[in-house]
Amino acid sequence: MILDLEQIKKIESAVGKEVADEFLHLQKTEKDKEKEQRKRRQNKDFTQVYPAGWYRIQSLLRKNPTAARVYVFLAENIGADGTVCASRKTLAEALDYSVKTISRHIKTLETEGAIVVLKLGTANVYCLNPGEVWKSFSDAKAHAAFRTKTLVSKSENPFVKKRLATLVGKDEGVVKQEDFDLDEDIEEMIKVAPDSDV
């Protein structure tokens, strides 16, 4: 229950400012605990690896260490639905491989049944087996809604920093002038514009 200013004043007049302040402090502490508990339940920074997943990783490490590295990178970056969306170029940059190497090992992972690849424009959605790796509650597996976690790279999205800064604000709502070096952006836009659909 969140109290408005008038309710707080009524409590203060009835029990005194110190007691009202203590009540508000306890209320805030309880609210913070609930928020922290909800956050922990989301398993945001935790990836569950089941026995089949460990077997997959061990098998890939023996047969094809590069494919194992790609698989582990995908597993680390899946969203709560067991998927991640990224272009092969983004994966190549993140793992310091060529796009051709990434393509070859994605195909290997697909052939091995470790992943399912869905096309999404020029990117791919990589779906990992929820019986091997998962990032949410176990009972949510049957209801995965394909809200993908999407990875992008600077080279494919040269203005991403500025776009995100304007969308969510930098440093808790403060957008700095350095985020808007327009001369540099205009020059880049002129180079990119003929190929762009946007």
Image: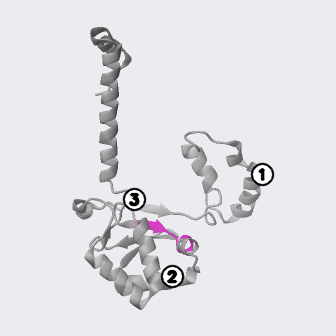
Which tag, 1 or 3, sits closer to the chain's start? 3
Determine the image quadrant of residue 174. Answer: top right
In which quadrant of the rendered image does the N terminus lie? top left
Q: Residue at x 50, y 69 (%)?
A: 123
**Dot 2: few (<14), some (14–19), or many (≥20) neighbours within 10 Å?**
some
Q: Estimate the x, y position of residue 53 in percent, counting from the top left.
A: 31, 76
Q: Is residue 91 left or right of residue 55?
A: right
Tell me how far mark 2 sits from mark 1, CA to CA: 36 Å
Q: Marks 2/3: CA distance?
A: 27 Å
Q: Which mark is residue 145?
A: none
Horizontal and vertical percent position of residue 8: 34, 16
Which residues lie in the magenta part?
Answer: 84-90
Callout 2 amino acid: Ser
Q: Label 1 to label 3, Cα distance in Å?
A: 38 Å
Residue that label 3 marks: 45
Within 10 Å of disc 1 (Cα), the crowding (few <14, some 14-19, many 20+) is few
Q: Which residue is mark 1?
A: 183
Answer left or right for 34 relative to 165: left
Q: Which residue is mark 2?
A: 103
Name the N-terminal-most of marks 2 and 1: 2
Of the numbered discs 2 and 3, the one sitting upstream in the chain is 3
Q: Quadrant of residue 84?
A: bottom left
Residue type indicated by callout 3: Asp
Q: Nearer the viewer, residue 123 or 71?
A: 71
Q: Tags 1 and 3 in contact by the CB under 8 Å rule?
A: no
* Closer-to-camera residue (55/158): 55
